[in-house]
Image (cartoon, helix red, strand yellow):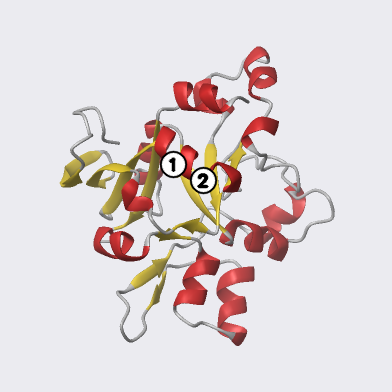
Amino acid sequence: MKVDTLVEKYPRLYHMAHEGAWPAIVEHGLLSVEALLDLYGIEGEEREAHFARHRPEIVPLSADGLPGAVLRDQKPMRDSALEKCLEDGLQPSDWYRTLNSKSFFWLSRKRVWNLLDARAYRGRKQTVLTLDTAKLVDAYRDRILLSPMNSGSTIYAPLPRGKSTFRRIEDFPFEERRKAGRGLYGNVVELLVESGVPDVSEYVLAVHEAEKDRLLGEVWRSVDATDEDHP
């Protein structure tokens, strides 16, 4: 896939964080779970539990001199389902380590609303970031990967996944998938940044609070944002 095609077809990226997360994101960026564990000094068995095992619930983090942070739960995944769909000899712990070393963005606002309406998050307010794809890709191109699926879900009929699931932009088979009938919604599903984006606020156009099927209000807005920059 060409970078220009990615930016043209998916000009906006979206990320859902917990309610009230924006001040901490401004201060420390949008970090991977691994980077957050480093920042908060989590080591030993506790680190292994958060990094290489399934998280059924949200995990709050705290440390002197740092704002509170949250590790999102992984309710849409199950070890038993992962064991059936993982390829290349990978084990569930390998997949959790892979996911936890990256920060994730949706390329469709529809997927944000699907997640907001999911049983695990229905009835909970969430913070949604809308980002400028071109600016983020320009800054992080060498650390960006693309995924053809929701890599953090094994609900329903989980798709096979393995070492080749995440591809560099130039290696992603966008045209092949398009010719096979994949529309934009189902072609590139996730954009990932290895380790995270510590200066993510530089690429955010707008921040909103949302719940289930309702946009509750705007938290912050860039001077470059338009009225269409929302989930």
Residue tagged 2: 140
Q: Is residue 148 left or right of residue 202?
A: right
Crowding at dot 1, Cα within 10 Å, few <14 / some 14-19 / many 20+, comes out as many
On residue 220, the disc is: none
Quadrant showing the C terminus = top left
Separation of residues labelled 2 and 1 (CA atoms): 6 Å
Q: Splitting the image into 4 quarters, where does residue 117 fall?
A: top left
**Contact between labelled residues 1 and 2, with CB atoms less than 8 Å apart:** yes
Q: Is residue 9 left or right of residue 208?
A: right
Q: Splitting the image into 4 quarters, where does residue 132 fall?
A: top left
Q: Residue 61 location in percent, x, y?
A: 39, 77
Secondary element at image label 1: helix
Q: Nearer the viewer, residue 76 or 137?
A: 137
Q: Residue 87 location in percent, x, y?
A: 80, 48
Q: Residue at x 35, y 55 (%)?
A: 17
Q: Residue 29 location in percent, x, y?
A: 38, 60
Q: Nearer the viewer, residue 120 or 201?
A: 201
Q: Residue at x 79, y 57 (%)?
A: 90
Q: Splitting the image into 4 quarters, where does residue 3 fall?
A: top right
Residue tagged 1: 136
Please, what is the three-letter code of the amino acid marked with disc 1?
Answer: Leu
Please, what is the three-letter code of the amino acid marked with disc 2?
Answer: Tyr
Q: Nearer the viewer, residue 88 or 204?
A: 204
